[in-house]
Amino acid sequence: MIEIKNLTKRFNNGIITALDNISCQIESNKITGFIGPDGAGKTTLLRILAGILTPNTGEIEISGQTLDIYEKGNSDFLSIHELQKMTSYMPQKFGLYEDLTVMENLELYAQLQRLEGNGKQQAFENVLQMTKLANFTNRLAGNLSGGMKQKLGLACALLKKPKILILDEPSVGVDPISRRDLIGMVNSMLDEDTTVLWSTAYLDEAENLDYVILLNEGKVIFQGNPKEAIDKVKGRVYVFSDVTRDKRKFASHLLKVDGVIDSVIAGKNIKILTNGRSIQEITSDLQDIKEPRSALPIFEDACIDILGGMAEKESPVLQYIDDVKFSAIDANVVEAIHLTKRFGDFIAVNDISFGVKPGRIFGLLGPNGSGKSTTFRMLCGLLRQNSGTAKIAGIDIADMGSDAKMNIGYMAQKFSLYSMLSVRQNLDFFSGAYRLSGKERQNAVKSMIEIFHFGDIQNINAGVLSLGFKQRLALACAIMHKPPVLFLDEPTSGVDPITRKEFWMHINAMVSRGMSVVVTTHFMDEAENCDEIALVYRGKMRAMGSPDELKEICNNEENPTLEKAFIKIVEVADQNEQFTKTFKE
């Protein structure tokens, strides 16, 4: 049992309060989840519990013994040194050595934990078997996929069985199968002497944990079993089925109706969360729609309810982006035609073809290392293919001049802006790179600052921003020149639920203006926003269709979901290398 009493932590000479007098209890033999928006205080709290940070005030008790958190040398207290001997900590960012192999990293961590002889070899065998990394011991850590990197980080943390295991967003940027594996590994080592602290941005993941602590602005606003929070929104979730009108405009309209807290696109359906106002009153002014059906809530609904939903009900991007017009409305705006890419003997992308129509969202899904980002980069002209053709608006990307490439917006998977420049300086630089000038350039920078709420941080260096604001800045730089085609490579990876919803409100607004978007994501609920999805695995196209069509693949299961379809497709492809499934409109 860990008990936290009145803990406060401030930064910048007391200007920023990261934790504000919080108190909570963490039980042994359970996985306790820490969730909340960016800047809520999750990482600060975990670092204090790992003995890395010192709070300003407050106490921590571990198994009834007070922690000497201020290192005053009281012999009756548990020392920081003793705490760290019983604790394993996996930080939010990949903290291993990318220029060392998997085995060299394990050897290094074994030395740090003073493992020797048979005990070390047995530990290696255990973690390599558990993480399925036994066949990759000679691979450089920097060359591993995102999921494999996270598994290696967990392997190093578990070489010596800890009493306290602290995992700060271990599944960020990881596909559903690898996330399932990570949870399974941690569950397999739980016993009465183990306490696991797990922070996560995935609310479906948190829903299955034993206990969650929801933080916001440095305060605990909910703690308990996720089911307790879900019970509070029962009877307040409804689904409009088989929406035939423009689903993006309808979802946006519903969000502005009095009594609606959240409105979510789910394939051809739209789900709303209400504040308790009757559904009859909410739908009284809606015409030509089917009566919505009541639906069971999930943990995300409960968290959105507790956090109060999004501050904005309509994307201000609508006022900035002009209507996009293409000469042929039925022609593909983006085309991949038999794309193939090899790295030496390794085939990363193997004969992939698809097309994206104007004003549509096309999703590229797949496990880590499946070939998504390689395909993505070929379509953007950032990587030359070995064979095949990538076209934008009918023009081969290889033949495109720099002027034509101004019609593309690109947001990279990793933060790729200039960390040493301020927010405004980055916006100034990219507006110039996209050849905006004069008043148009000034208006673009001003609009991005207003739309993404950079006003108070515009002079702060981008490198010190929270992840949520870094992603907002990257998106702003990608759209400020109003491109008709936008590529987004995992744009919401690691950001909190409210920020994710804000991003998709902007994306759907741009698409309603006619923009075409190609996006990769590991959030299956986000993929429901797509008009069409291609699932790539081992470099090949395995399935393509609308979200609802892909869910038909697991229709024999109770409550078919995109995540279940994703896992099913990958499992079938493992058994049959030739497996593909496409749905034609």
Image (tube, helix red, strand yellow):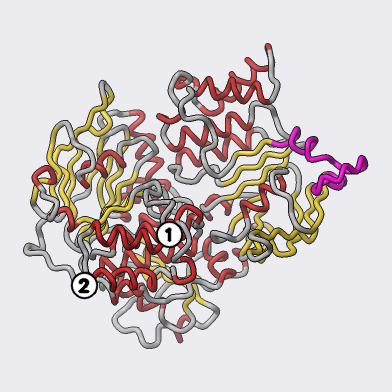
Looking at the rendered structure, which numbered label has been put on residue 422?
1
Q: Which residues are magenta?
A: 63-87
Q: Visible in this render: residue 397? A: yes
**Relative to residue 118, is residue 247 drawn left or right?**
left
The part of the image, by quadrant, that contains residue 339 is: top left
**Residue drawn at point x = 35 percent, y = 69 percent:** 448
Looking at the rendered structure, which numbered label has been put on residue 37?
none
The part of the image, by quadrant, that contains residue 574 is: top left
Can you say whether 353 is above or below 229 in the image? above
Looking at the rendered structure, which numbered label has been put on residue 322?
2
Neighbour tally class for label 1: few under 14, some 14-19, many 20 plus, Cα within 10 Å? some
* Residue 76 included in the magenta stretch of the image: yes
**Residue drawn at point x = 29 percent, y = 74 percent:** 318
| Labels 2 and 1: the sequence-earlier one | 2
Give the distance between the C-alpha atoms of the residues marked 2 and 1, in whole angstroms. Answer: 28 Å
Residue 413 position, x and y percent, is 37, 47
**Relative to residue 428, is residue 146 drawn left or right?**
right
**Residue drawn at point x = 40 percent, y = 49 percent:** 415
**Relative to residue 6, is residue 352 drawn left or right?**
left
Residue 287 position, x and y percent, is 31, 84
Q: Are marks 2 and 1 in contact (CB under 8 Å)?
A: no
Can you say whether 3 is above or below 298 in the image? above
